[in-house]
Image: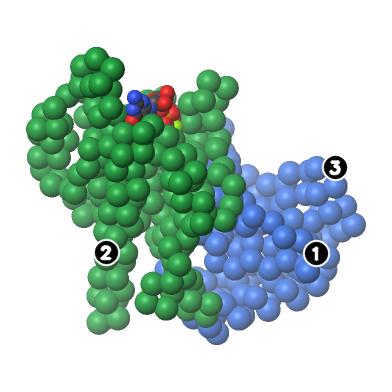
Chain colours: A green, B blue
Amino acid sequence: MAFINLKDKILQAKIVYYGPGRCGKTTNLEYIYNKCRLQVHSEMVTVKTQGDRTLFFDFFPFDMGKINGYEVKIQLYTVPGQVKYNSTRRLVLKGVDGVVFVADSAAERRDKNVISLRNLEENLALYNKNIYEIPLVIQYNKRDLAKQGVEVLDVETMEKDINSRLKAPSFEASAVEGGNVVLTLKKIIYETMASLEKELKQEQAK
Amino acid sequence: MMLGKEQLEKIHNTLTENLIGSGVKSVILIDTAGNVIASIDNANTALDIYSLAALAAANFGAMSCMAKIVGEDEFSLLFHKGEKENIYFSKVSEDFLLVNIFDNQISLGFLRLKMSKVIEELVAVLVK
Ligand SMILES: Nc1nc2c(ncn2[C@@H]2O[C@H](COP(=O)(O)OP(=O)(O)OP(=O)(O)O)[C@@H](O)[C@H]2O)c(=O)[nH]1
Ligand SMILES: [Mg+2]
């Protein structure tokens, strides 16, 4: 649920990075945080375990500057991917406006991606949100693993597993190297803003 | 969710008068998604309100889940006491929370007295 302040002309929207454990959600946010210093004016908040796994979420607000006269602030979050943290994952999804689904390209993680996507669908449904309608971008992360001799799924297979029915915009990426990380972010922000604009127009037409 | 000038001014006034006026250092009205609806502080306090809002919303959500697990609807009082600073959360409605930061010069009891009036006024603006 985005919040629009008509007095000070500020729009806040929430984008959540979702995906299985260790797929690279936190690494995506860390890359953005370090690369886009001019657009981040707070510390990154991370609630994690000793072993660097996300326990609750990572967070920072990303400033888009002025769009149509409104100061746009994108609240970026990650969820904990580990299966056992489903209740905290749900909490983070509350009020979500757009989702990046980060899939792990490592062949051995194939099932984990599919299970996590199904879990996303279920958790969105708890908030009466439809995975086919919410702004969604899919990222095939860890493409660089192929260079290290790790078996990597080809993109056609991943599209078939994950995106055959969703038909969401998708990108190959490497969160450690940074390839397509910012592009993924730009795309989901664009999709989210377009969707909010449409919603507003419908609201005003009523 | 959209709020206009008049609504936000009403919110601002009630928070300033009743809370900042009573010695609360910083008060942030947030929604349960973690968005900042309004934030006011006395001139001497500058906090990272967006981070605070994200954490407060998550904390409140986690406490609500815990309440359900032990068979309560919710815990009515969420209070964190520090050596100098304290945080007090109050639920305004299903969708909104108020986060108060105050030092030891005001008592929790006094704040709770103020709070019922503030919440009533906020609900009148926020919940249609
Ligand atoms: N080779 C490679 N490793 C990556 C990439 N992205 C993340 N990793 C590594 O994968 C591991 C897990 O990354 P995280 O970003 O912590 O994963 P996460 O999705 O946040 O995991 P949870 O918090 O448990 O859900 C770390 O060791 C990262 O360095 C990538 O693009 N390529
Ligand atoms: Mg993580």
To which quarter of the image does residue A194 belong? bottom left
Q: Which residue is mark 2?
A: A195
User: Nearer the N terminus, badge 3 or badge 1?
Assistant: 1
Along the line of sight, which residue is nearer the eye, B43 or B81?
B43
Question: What chain is tagged by disc 2?
Answer: A
**Mark 2 C-beta to ligand 1 under 8 Å:** no
Q: Give coordinates of residue A113: x percent, y percent.
A: 25, 29
Label 2 – label 1 distance at C-alpha = 39 Å
Check disc 3 and give the amino acid type: Glu
Q: Which residue is mark 3?
A: B83
SS at circle 1: loop
User: At x 64% / y 55%, what residue is drawn?
Assistant: B48
Q: Nearer the viewer, mark 2 or mark 1?
A: 1
- Is the residue at mark 3 from the same chain as the one at mark 1? yes
Which quadrant of the figure contains the N terminus of chain A?
Answer: bottom left
Position of B26 relative to A132 (above/below): below
User: At x 49% / y 45%, what residue is drawn?
Assistant: A33
Along the line of sight, which residue is nearer the eye, B56 or A151?
A151
Residue B123 placement, left or right of A54: right
- Is the residue at mark 3 from the same chain as the one at mark 2? no
SS at circle 3: loop
User: At x 34% / y 43%, what residue is drawn?
Assistant: A181
Q: Residues within 10 Å of mark 3 (few under 14, many from 20)?
A: few
- Is the residue at mark 2 from the same chain as the one at mark 1? no
Q: Give coordinates of residue A71: x percent, y percent.
A: 47, 70
Please state the total of marks drawn on the protein image.
Answer: 3
Q: Which residue is at the far bottom?
A: B6
Residue B102 placement, left or right of A30: right
The reply to whether callout 3 and callout 1 are in contact (CB within 8 Å) is no
